[in-house]
Amino acid sequence: MEKRGQAIRHGRVWEARILSHDEAAEEDRRFDSGMKQASKFLSYVLRHEPVAIGLQLDAQGWASIEDLVTLTQGREVPLSRELIEAVVAKNDKQRFSISPDGLRIRANQGHSLSVDLGLQPVRPPEILFHGTATRFLESIRSAGLAPQLRQHVHLSPDAETATRVGQRHGKPVVLQVRAAALFDAGTPFYLSENGVWLTPVVPLDYLIFPL
Ligand code: HQG
């Protein structure tokens, strides 16, 4: 009996442990999904549509964190300073920066809005990579790479990253860009705060398609 009682007691303890483990995992999941939602929302308002919440960006793309908190209360994605700071610190691609005084935030790249990130032209490596989807190839083969809705064409430093970028659009394909030659021909290249290469356009002559 005693043994059974112990076993039951142990069982309960074990059950309680499993439960609390599950609860902790659930809490982590909720936190992660809250961060993801906040990150997507920040990308949207800081890169594309600040007017959607009446937010003002300055010419360099900075927004006041206090304004962001105030303007998002009672909306779908209410932000707090803590949540914003966590998103900036933990973001997988370091998409955002907070100003040195801690008062403002901006997206490091990816804007469709015209903002001046203050980046200086840099000579890129010989080859950079562009991940796209196979369904865009025909058009790219005739027109080269255009920034479409964004300010710049986005290029990756390695083929693995480019593959991930291309996957967002469909079946991925990676093009090589003769970046140093294009730079030497007078086209500026910029390196964003989070390691993404940016350039206004890539003409066909500077693209290498996979066989
Ligand atoms: C394609 C993500 C037809 C281009 C990523 C791309 C990146 C053409 C799509 C960042 C074309 C535009 C940007 C032409 C280019 N004809 N299609 N002539 N020229 N395209 O999303 O480079 O996660 O605006 O190949 O990691 O995919 O948001 O650009 O497929 O860094 O931080 O038009 O977004 O960063 O798509 O991605 P996008 P992208 P985040």
Image (cartoon, grey):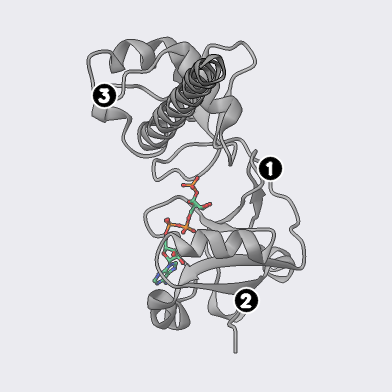
- In the image, what residue type sits under mark 3? Ile
Picture disc at residue 179: none
- Front-lying residue, 3 or 86: 3
- Front-lying residue, 170 or 98: 170
- Front-lying residue, 34 or 198: 34
Q: N-terminal of the two: label 1 or label 3? A: 3
Residue 92 in picture, x, y percent from top left: 58, 39
Residue pictured at 51% horizontal, 17% vertical: 1
Quadrant observed for ligand 1 in the rendered image: bottom left
Q: Is residue 23 above or below residue 199?
A: above
Q: N-terminal of the two: label 1 or label 2? A: 1
- In the image, what residue type sits under mark 1? Gln
Residue 3 in picture, x, y percent from top left: 57, 19
Would residue 208 be visible to someone looking at this image? yes
For residue 112, which quarter of the picture?
Answer: top left
Q: Is residue 12 above or below residue 172?
A: above
- Front-lying residue, 180 or 127: 127
Judging from the image, what secondary structure is the residue with disc 1 in?
Answer: loop
- In the image, what residue type sits under mark 2? Tyr
Judging from the image, what secondary structure is the residue with disc 3 in?
Answer: helix
Q: Residues within 10 Å of mark 3 (few under 14, many from 20)?
A: few
Q: Report the Cα–Cα distance between label 3 and label 2.
A: 40 Å
Residue pictured at 55% horizontal, 19% vertical: 10
Residue 125 in picture, x, y percent from top left: 77, 62
Q: Residues within 10 Å of mark 1 (few under 14, many from 20)?
A: few
- In the rendered image, which residue does mark 3 sit on? 53
Residue 74 in picture, x, y percent from top left: 22, 14
Quadrant where the C terminus sits is bottom right
Q: Report the Cα–Cα distance between label 1 and label 3.
A: 31 Å
- In the rendered image, which residue does mark 2 sit on? 206
Judging from the image, what secondary structure is the residue with disc 2 in?
Answer: helix
- In the rendered image, which residue does mark 1 sit on? 120
